[in-house]
Amino acid sequence: MRVVIAEDLALLREGLVALLRENEIDVVAQVEDGPGLLRAIAGHRPDLAIVDVRLPPTFSDEGLRAAIEARRRQPKLGVLVLSQYVETAYANELIGENTAGIGYLLKERIGDVRAFLDALQRVAAGGTVLDRQVVTQLLAARDGARNALSSLTGREREVLELMAEGRSNTAIAESMFVTPGAVEKHITNIFAKLDLAACDDDHRRVLAVLVYLRVAR
Amino acid sequence: MPTLAAGLSVGEYVRSVMFRLAALIAVLLSAIWALDGQGYFWPAWAWLGLGVPLMLDRTASWAWRHPPGAVRRVACVWALVSVAAVILILTWLLTWLLAGVQTFWPAWALLGLGTAGSAYSLFALHDRVLVAHGRRALRARVEALTRARHQAVDAQAAELRRIERDLHDGAQARLVALTMQLGRAELRVEREPDLRRLIHDAQREAHRAIAELRDLARGIVPPLLADRGLLAAVESLAARYGLGTSIRSDTQRRLAPAIERAAYFVIAEALTNTAKHASATNSWVQLSDQPPGLVVVVGDDGRGGADPEGSGLAGLRARVEALDGSLRVLSPAGQGTVLEVGIPCA
């Protein structure tokens, strides 16, 4: 996998590059701002761009705008946006009409290296990965969802959040220290309570949750 | 006296009758002089005598046009002084023309009148002059303080933004880098469960610190507020409360950071109160940015009865008043709560 990184803080950029290289991911370019990102994706044609939301010169949402522009120019490009805070407004803008190959995670999720690498693979392969906080916020924002949400147990809610990160049943089971069978049962319950058609495919599952959360907003 | 200036019809009538009477007398006396064989033109004195009330009337109505109080009193004094001066000068003119008196005898009297008038003016108006001076000084002081306060508020907003950026690029970034390193370390000790658990616990602590710093940073400068402005931040805020709050705004314009911040935290506090205490079924936020400034209305149809002097609302009031704004709370028991804030914007 060939990756471009857009991050203005050297400390984080270098840490991320070291982590990716250790795990045999090819970092083809490192840039510090939005225009740099657009030049790098045009020059290197990477599979994935990892972009910090806050980039110079404005230090506001420059990275997000650049990521959206990069996707417009190269629809096949996977884009993983990293931030130190989660805003559902940004998630919605990023997702736009096309959910394929989109990720939005808090930066500290990188610490869970396996899950992070897994997320990179999925986004590069056209999957959707959303931070569990996006799910929490979207759920809180939806009137109807609040009732449905209150009917979920704590475990089911946890599974829902991990599902939004696009994780497989096995990954969810590992992370929660339960058996895959238990996870499957939770998922069946969640889909029943939220009145969603069940499906096994990880990506389609995220979409179903996402569609549910975004409807009637 | 008022009849002179106010021009009441009775006053005007009396005046015109008197003028005609005076003119008639003057003509009659002149005719008598002419018939009497002329010689010394004595009617001139009568003319002078008849002219005095006329002059008094004119100057008095001029003096009365001034605002009541010291200024009008001074004007009256000068009216009298000028009438007296004119009488003196005309009298001298007549004695010179008719009797050939050469010396300008009214000089000392005129000097006395002028001195007396000036002395009285000074006496009557000195406090007024001083007050005007004091008022100008006070106005300059208020302007300086207002400017200083605006600068302080703007400087505070800039400083907060700087602190937030320092946190973001400093402590928060370092902790994120730490979790990356811990993550890498964790992968290398997969076969040593004790060590792995230790690293895992360290990760968890780092995550907690990151979360706490994030909350802190959000309290200093909410990211969406800084990036996208008030409306976007309020929409996100309202969504977070999940009250189904309806939001209306007539503006997308970015305002001064200090104003956006104040408005944001007012709305946040109001929505918190609604969520906690109001038991409301509907809530709404209205933003209006029309001259002279931003108006924010936050309302709900809950149980009302909020204490306008309570500590939460007092804090909001202080925040708004620091920007020359005002805050009103309407919260009759059982009839919902409406909070209205106005902040002037340039």
Image (cartoon, coloured by chain):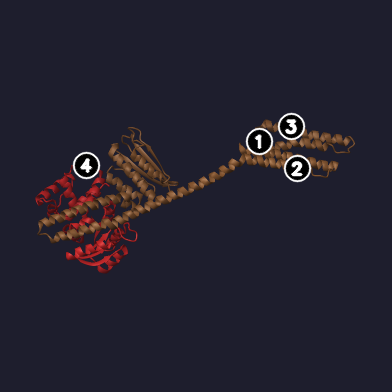
Residue B17's disc number:
3
Q: The numbered mark 3 sits on a residue in which chain? A: B
Report whether mark 2 lies on the same chain as mark 3: yes
Q: Residues within 10 Å of mark 2 (few under 14, many from 20)?
A: few
Location of residue B13 (image quadrant):
top right
Q: Name the residue located 31 percent from the left edge and 54 percent from the top edge.
A: B164
Chain coloured brown in the rendered structure: B
User: Mark 2 vs mark 3: which is more N-terminal?
Assistant: 3
Image spot of residue B268 (x, y percent): 32, 44
Tell me the SS state at disc 3: helix
Q: Is residue B238 above or below residue B11?
A: below
Q: CA distance from mark 2 to mark 3?
A: 37 Å
Q: CA distance from mark 2 to mark 4?
A: 102 Å
Tell me the SS state at disc 1: helix
User: Mark 1 vs mark 3: which is more N-terminal?
Assistant: 1
Q: CA distance from mark 1 to mark 2?
A: 33 Å
Q: Nearer the viewer, mark 2 or mark 4?
A: 2
Image spot of residue B31 (x, y percent): 85, 35
Residue farthest bottom in this picture: A43
Residue that numbered label 4 is attached to: A147
Q: Of B222 and A171, which appears nearest the observer?
A: B222
Q: Residues within 10 Å of mark 4 (few under 14, many from 20)?
A: some
Image spot of residue A5 (x, y percent): 25, 63
Q: The numbered mark 4 sits on a residue in which chain? A: A
- The amino acid type, in three-letter code, at marker 3 is Val
Q: The numbered mark 1 sits on a residue in which chain? A: B
Q: CA distance from mark 3 to mark 4?
A: 94 Å
